[in-house]
Image (cartoon, rainbow, N blue to C red):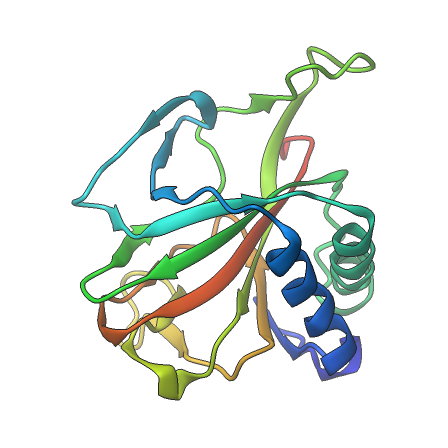
């Protein structure tokens, strides 16, 4: 999988049929609980809010099982160490979120990393150890022909550049990997349903 990844501020690759089928299998076997999309406040999962001015859509979480951990863990670790030059200190996949964007749904400009570090609830080994999101991943679950709008924009050249961002609307099974502190957005969907999977990889805060 990794030899299709670009060496850039972000990476793009395409999952093969075997690995994409694993994702679909987990989704199909999970009893999904759909909720309105929420926004975390300062990285605190106990402080969540609905904010229709920032985000609109439906989300559900998948269990982080051995199949998904192996699939994403190997690819992200390889990209982090061998392709991107990031060499981030990363430790675990925080969560895997399934997102459906219907007509009018969007996610305005934001970053995934937290203003303040988070702490792992119930971590018996490091109960007071701080963490933050370092790597974000988006997997496109359906083809661009199935919906209008819904493009993923990544700010790759800064807010003052003439061409501020790169835009992605990729085939089913495509994956974008980028640093969690990179500004990004999902443009409003104008028809159909945009389906995606997002996950965040955490590690000790940058010093």
As rendered, which of 175 and 162 lies closer to the eye? 175
Q: Is residue 201 left or right of residue 9?
A: right
- Residue 150 point in image, percent of width and height: 31, 71
Number of residue marks: 0
- Of all residues, the one furthest to the bottom in this rendering is 145
Q: Is residue 112 left or right of residue 179?
A: left
The reply to whether residue 156 is visible in this rendering is no
Check the picture and name the quadrant holding the N terminus. bottom right
- Residue 85 point in image, percent of width and height: 73, 62
- Residue 108 point in image, percent of width and height: 26, 54
- Residue 53 point in image, percent of width and height: 16, 45
Taking the spot 73% from the left edge, 81% from the top edge, the residue there is 17
Taking the spot 43% from the left edge, 56% from the top edge, the residue there is 99
Q: Is residue 41 left or right of residue 55?
A: right
124 to 21, vertically: above or below = above
Taking the spot 71% from the left edge, 72% from the top edge, the residue there is 21
Taking the spot 64% from the left edge, 66% from the top edge, the residue there is 24
As rendered, which of 171 and 89 lies closer to the eye? 171
Q: Is residue 109 left or right of residue 1?
A: left
174 to 86, vertically: above or below = below
The reply to whether residue 42 is visible in this rendering is yes
70 to 131, vertically: above or below = below
| Quarter assignment of residue 207 | top right
As rendered, which of 60 and 49 lies closer to the eye? 60
């Amino acid at each position: 999988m990794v030899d299709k990844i670009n060496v850039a501020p972000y990476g793009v690759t395409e999952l093969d049929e075997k690995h994409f089928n694993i994702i679909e299998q987990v989704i199909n076997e999970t009893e999904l609980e759909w909720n309105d999309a929420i926004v975390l406040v300062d990285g605190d999962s106990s402080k969540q809010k609905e904010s229709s001015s920032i985000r609109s859509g439906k989300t559900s979480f998948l269990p982080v099982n051995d199949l998904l951990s192996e699939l994403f863990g190997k690819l992200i670790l390889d990209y982090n160490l061998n392709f991107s030059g990031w060499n981030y200190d990363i430790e675990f996949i925080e969560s895997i979120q399934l997102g459906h964007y219907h007509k009018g749904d969007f996610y305005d400009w934001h970053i995934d990393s937290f203003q303040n570090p988070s702490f792992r609830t119930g971590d018996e080994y490091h109960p007071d150890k701080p963490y933050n999101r370092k790597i974000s991943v988006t997997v496109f679950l359906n083809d661009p022909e199935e919906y209008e709008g819904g493009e993923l924009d990544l700010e790759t050249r800064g807010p003052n550049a003439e061409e501020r961002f790169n835009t992605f609307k990729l085939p089913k099974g495509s994956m974008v990997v980028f640093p969690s502190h990179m500004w990004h957005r999902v443009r409003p969907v104008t028809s159909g349903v945009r389906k995606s999977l997002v996950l965040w990889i955490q590690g000790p805060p940058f010093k």
